[in-house]
Amino acid sequence: MSNITFAHPWFLLGLLLVPLMVAWYIWRYRKQEAALQHSNLSLFDGIGRSLRVRLRWLPYALRVIAVAAIVVALARPQSQLSRQEMTVEGIDVVLAMDISGSMLAEDFKPNRLEAAKKVAADFIEGRKNDRMGLVVFAGEAFTQVPLTIDHQVLLKQLGAVKSGIIQDGTALGDGLATAINRIKDSEAESKVIILLTDGVNNQGSVDPLSAAEIAALYNIRLYTIGVGSLGKAPFPFRDQFGRVHYQNIDVEIDEALMKQMAAATGDGRYFRATNKKALEQIFDQIDEMETSKIDVTQYAQTGGCTAIHLA
């Protein structure tokens, strides 16, 4: 019904006659009196209403339906089917995000993880034609959202991500391998993984460089992002009384490994974000680089009862 339009929609005002006709019939029925009045109805005990009496409303109902049909016909309902050639940009993207404890460091405001989530959400909202997925990792990895075009679900799940939901650590290889499993069978011409971390690989069963080489075999391009200021960063911790204290910790990112991982996939690149603004600019660069044109045909044609055949 969403594809139905009317050539003369003002005729639909005639449908206001329908409730008026129904109201008139009900009023008339209630005003009717018996043609033959008798003081004693005992003679009619056990006599039920005939089928004719029970269906006496049917002829009038058919008249009401006929009036409604005539009004709709006068409005000339038409189905719409259009054809429009257009080009959109769409690729398959999996975001692999580090959610280890160190992502709570506050050199980014409010912290690295929340800043990364906000920037990633803006990136997702700007890629309306892409299928996107989300993998999170720390000491282990799992898929938060498989590839989907439903970005509202993806954004909701991204917002729910927090540190501490899985074993702590940094398993870069496992995070990348999980992302590869989610995108390797995609039929898209352009397949991309964006891996974001603030640490050094220290856990997991998959070697990060080997995972990157596997990504290259599936024609997956890898962008790696190192998140963290230069030098030291304030990290919050609670004492035995629940009070929050801060300690400056060294920022350690294995940039050499992350550069190798990105380079192993051919056109991949490594980026370093030392603040939220730099992280936004990195995602903007990736957004500009990753455009894959897809030809899409939209059909639309307006017609009454004409049969339309499309080749």
Image (cartoon, rainbow, N blue to C red):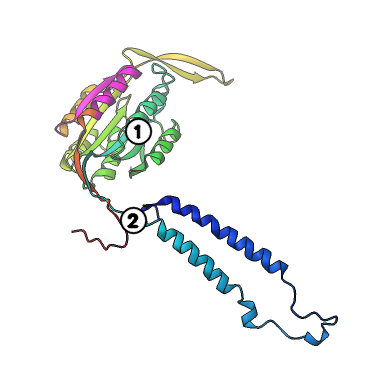
How many residues crowd mark 1 within 10 Å: few (<14), some (14–19), many (20+)? some
Q: What are the residue bounds of the magenta stretch?
A: 266-287
Residue found 34% across the figure and 44% down from its top: 146
The disc at residue 22 is none
Q: Is residue 142 visible?
A: yes
247 up-or-down from 255: above or below: above
Q: Along the horizontal axis of the image, is 86 left or right of 10?
A: left
Residue 186, horizontal then vertical, whole percent:
23, 47
* Quadrant in which the C terminus is drawn: bottom left
For the residue pair 3 and 216, the one nearer the viewer reads as 3
202 or 39, nearer to the observer: 39
Question: Seen from this angle, which residue lies furthest front?
Answer: 35
| Distance from the alpha carbon under mark 1 to that under mark 2 | 33 Å
Q: What's the residue at 60%, 63% (across, down)?
A: 22
Which quadrant holds the N terminus?
A: bottom left
Tell me which corner region of the image, top left, top right, bottom left or bottom right, holds residue 49. bottom right
Of the numbered discs in the image, which one, if any, rests on residue 79?
2
Based on the displayed image, in which of its 4 quarters is residue 112 positioned?
top left
User: Looking at numbered disc 2 in the image, what kind of residue is underneath it?
Assistant: Ser
Instruction: Report the amino acid beneath label 1.
Output: Glu
Depth check: 40 or 242 in front? 40
**Does the image show residue 185?**
no
How many residues crowd mark 2 within 10 Å: few (<14), some (14–19), many (20+)?
some
Q: Residue placed farthest to the right in the image? A: 39
Q: Which residue is mark 1?
A: 125
- Secondary structure, mark 2, is strand
Instruction: Give x and y (percent) for residue 180.
Output: 26, 41
Provide the secondary structure element on which disc 1 rests.
helix
- Residue at (33% x, 18% y) in the render: 277
Q: In this rendering, would 124 be left or right of 156?
A: left
Is 100 situated above or below 76?
above
Of the numbered discs 1 and 2, the one sitting upstream in the chain is 2
